[in-house]
Amino acid sequence: MAQIEVKVKLDLPAGVELLGYERSGDGHGFEVKFPLPDFCRCELCGHEEAASYESKNTVYVVRDLDLWGQPSFLIFQPSFHRCSRCGHRQEHLAPFKRKKVMYTYRFEEYVLRMLIGSNEEEVAQRLGISAETVALIVEKQLKDDKQIDPERVIKHVGFDELSLKKRHKLYVTLMTDLTDPDSPKVLAVARGRDTAAAKQCLGKLSREQRAAVETHRVDMGKVYGPVCNDLLPNSRLIVDRFHVAKQFNDGVDDLRKKNHAEVQGHLVEGRAEAVPLADVGVPAGPEGPEARGAGGVGRLVCRVAGVERPA
């Protein structure tokens, strides 16, 4: 069997070192390690001392960003320190995930971006996780008091509304740093899709950062644009192409339903809108026994176009 060598450039979390790789089914497993601190403070009694770590015989498998459209996981062995004063054993948390969850911080942000134009059930199905996990990720992001580094240079921001459930008025506003298009960064998350939510997100930026923003990308609604115009003095509006395409497709679909109503079960009399006669393309009727059927088709096209077919 022929073998090939494939080189992959991995974007690992800061401070994480790769030890090995294993393929399991349609997933990718990366064995990693990360530096442990030299000192540890007991979370129970507050005693601080030189750290002495012990490891369990189990490993943690943590969901990370997809690779080639397939799930990938960071695999590591957890380490614990036992306090010499009170005997409490506490785990040293991995720097790339929360406590008591099995997915990374950046996977949480990936889930938020996947919710743009979608909902919890659809995202859960695409990623192979439960809808409850998606809802929990959103709730944790809402509860986080995200602090933005005041030295961070932000030139382009995007605003999106997330619809969490179908047929429910459960919305979240998402503000994203689009300065690096290959690596968008979630800056703030706020409950709702109104002016207050937009102001709450922009309030995370310093005055200097707001003045440095060059463009803001929003949907075609009436909320985010005016707020950005007020709080981002040097920024210009860019309508998200996703929403432009959606509005265009909705308009084309409305015309299709109106101009081809007979396909839907009834015929709307009258001239079709935005369909020039020259573009209707009615062919000349054939001679012979097939003329009757072809003529029927021609009359139908002419009726839809609102013109009289010549005899």
Image (cartoon, rainbow, N blue to C red):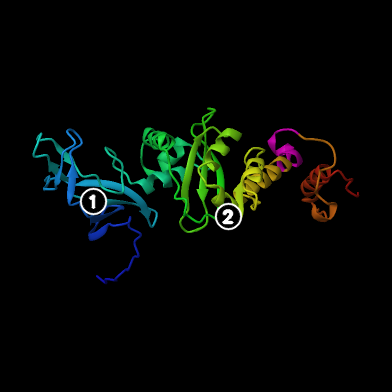
- Residue 227 locus on image (x, y percent): 63, 41
| Residue 32: quadrant of the picture | bottom left
Highlighted range, magenta: 256-266
Q: Is residue 78 visible?
A: no
| In front of the other: 196 or 13 | 196
**Whole-number angstrom distance, CA of label 1 to CA of label 2:** 40 Å
Crowd rating for badge 1 (residues with CA inside 10 Å; few <14, some 14–19, many 20+): many
**Who's the residue at 47% across and 46% down the image?**
187
| The label number, if any, that marks residue 49 in the structure image | none
Q: Magenta stretch: dominant SS?
A: helix
| In front of the other: 48 or 303 | 48
Amino acid identity at mark 2: Ala
Tell me, yes or no, whether the highlighted magenta stretch contains residue 258.
yes
Q: Quadrant of the N terminus?
A: bottom left
- Residue 235 locus on image (x, y percent): 64, 52
Amino acid identity at mark 1: Ile
Tell me, yes or no, whether the highlighted magenta stretch contains residue 243.
no
**Who's the residue at 62% across and 41% down the image?**
224
What element does badge 2 sit on? Answer: helix
| In front of the other: 14 or 48 | 48
Farthest residue, direction top:
168
Q: Earlier in the sequence, mark 1 or mark 2?
A: 1
Which of the two marks, 1 or 2, is nearer to us in this view? 2
| The label number, if any, that marks residue 212 in the structure image | 2
Crowd rating for badge 2 (residues with CA inside 10 Å; few <14, some 14–19, many 20+): some
What element does badge 1 sit on? Answer: strand
Q: Is residue 259 visible?
A: yes
| The label number, if any, that marks residue 75 in the structure image | 1
Check contact, mark 1 vs mark 2: CB within 8 A.
no
Up-down relation of residue 302 to residue 33 (above or below): above
